[in-house]
Amino acid sequence: MNKQAPPVKKNDQLRVTIQDLTHEGAGVAKVNGYTLFVPKALPGEEVDIKVVKVNKGYGFARVMNIEEESPHRVEPPCTIYERCGGCQMQHMSYDGQLLFKQKQVKDVLERIGGLRSVPVHPTIGMSEPWRYRNKAQVPIGEEGGLVIGGFYQERSHTIIDTDKCLIQAEESDDAVHLIKRLANEYGIRAYDEKKHRGTLRHVVTRKGYETDELMVILVTRGKELPHKQKLLDAITKKLPNVKSIVQNINIKRTNVIFGDETNVLWGEEYIYDYIGDIKFAISARSFFQVNPEQTKVLYDKALEYANLTGDEIVIDAYCGIGTISLFLAQQAKHVYGVEIVPDAIADAKRNASLNGIENVDFAVGEAEKVMPWWYAQGIRPEVIVVDPPRKGCDQALLETILSMKPDRVVYVSCNPATLARDLKILEEGGYETKEVQPVDMFPQSTHVECVSVLELKKI
């Protein structure tokens, strides 16, 4: 028996009411039970759409006309917003974005985790949700014989040339604009990824928000950098805050930005920044949160949920460069951090030393292997903190946590779906999720971070 055909066809034009948003920020409409995803449409809007793709269970459409606007619709301030893939939510008011993120977390916890009674607090946003990124990674290309740089068009590798990005530090804009101008002036060719030739692949900048220090990283296809001294002289003259100019060499045919070799061309190997009172050394390749203002909000909440009195042993799984570990160490008896990336642990030890923090130990390895070894040495944590990548916690790590039975688990997450999955496993293992706090680390995008606290149920 043939299944019923979709009630719409490609190129159909119809009027629909937008009911919801996907986690990617696209509007959701229903036509006789059939789902259509409509980018740039907002809940409550009545829109005229054109169907552009039809699959068995769902389709895609684009907005032709908005008959009835959402009260949260605003005019995007960015001139290339419609073409650039960097932001997804500039057409929605900031209050609307915060509500969307809270609802997204709530819905996912219920749908995937079955957690219907867990309080999900209103999203903590920024007073100024622009110019917050301390790092820019700008691909360089050529158009009409000129070097250009900007951001990739959504779902493509076409570079949209721009001299201004409203979510990045203005110093980053200045640096990229200057390097494009110098490359054109000195005849330095941009990398051509199809032909694998040319010199300049990316310009990456890093800024210390508290220190105002700037690092400029030139990613090149080979070791040779034409007119190197002229470039260095011009950059140091025109960018007064620059403290470090670095060349990274990426000889591979790849979309990955950085190669294996990094050399300081001028100035220092590190710039510095603070989160709260803690100072961090940031190298070209260091992992460091891109929104330091909201990182402090996130970590303050993690510290609050850890509920430390000064007597606790804490394990920080996925500790990275020690950002959360060092925050926790201010109020814990001792913190043990574990991370699989050796360079990150080297940075973590350096950052502990930089701040004179001695009640921390860092180990390289897989958390699910290192933690049982610590346990065998008699280390009994009252609190375990996890801050995993988007794929969530490794199943073996969750089993390790359940076997160690800490009083509290603080879960910092950048992906509500894997958070919900992992909370469900921890709940089934004897924990209760007490509350979840969304934090907006990436205004104008669909991404949301959360901090959750679980407590061991008393038998």
Image (spheres, rainbow, N blue to C red):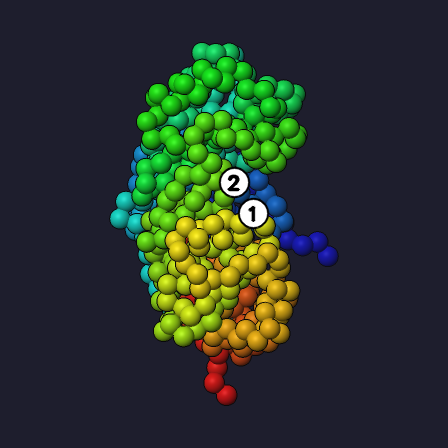
Query: Residue 436 in the image: x percent, y percent?
Result: 41, 66
Callout 2 amino acid: Arg
Q: How many marks?
A: 2
Q: Are marks 1 and 2 in contact (CB under 8 Å)?
A: yes
Which residue is located at x 35 percent, y 25 percent? 239
Q: Is residue 237 above or below residue 381?
A: above
Indicate the amino acid at tag 1. Answer: Asp
Label 2: which residue? 285
- The circle on residue 343 is 1
Q: Nearer the viewer, residue 252 or 444?
A: 252
Q: Give coordinates of residue 222: x percent, y percent.
A: 61, 24
- Quadrant of the frame with the N terminus: bottom right
Write the residue at 47% across / 55% down: 322
Residue nearest the observer in this picture, 148 or 407 = 407
Where does the image place residue 449, in percent across and percent down from the top left?
A: 43, 55
Q: What is the distance, in whole Å, between disc 1 and disc 2 at their CAs?
A: 9 Å
Q: Is residue 304 visible?
A: yes
Looking at the rendered structure, the secondary structure element under dot 1 is helix
Tell me which residue sits at (62%, 70%) in the image: 372
Residue 433 appears left or right of 340: left
**Disc 1 residue crowd, few under 14, some 14–19, many 20+, Cα 10 Å:** some
Q: Is residue 61 visible?
A: no
Q: Residues within 10 Å of mark 2 (few under 14, many from 20)?
A: few
On the image, the x and y values in percent for residue 252 come to: 65, 30
| Mark closest to the chain's N terminus, 1 or 2 | 2
Q: Residue furthest bottom?
A: 459
Of all residues, the one furthest to the left in this rendering is 127
Classify 74 as above or below 429.
Answer: above
Dot 2: what SS?
loop
**Circle number at residue 24:** none
Q: Residue at x 39, y 53 (%)?
A: 355
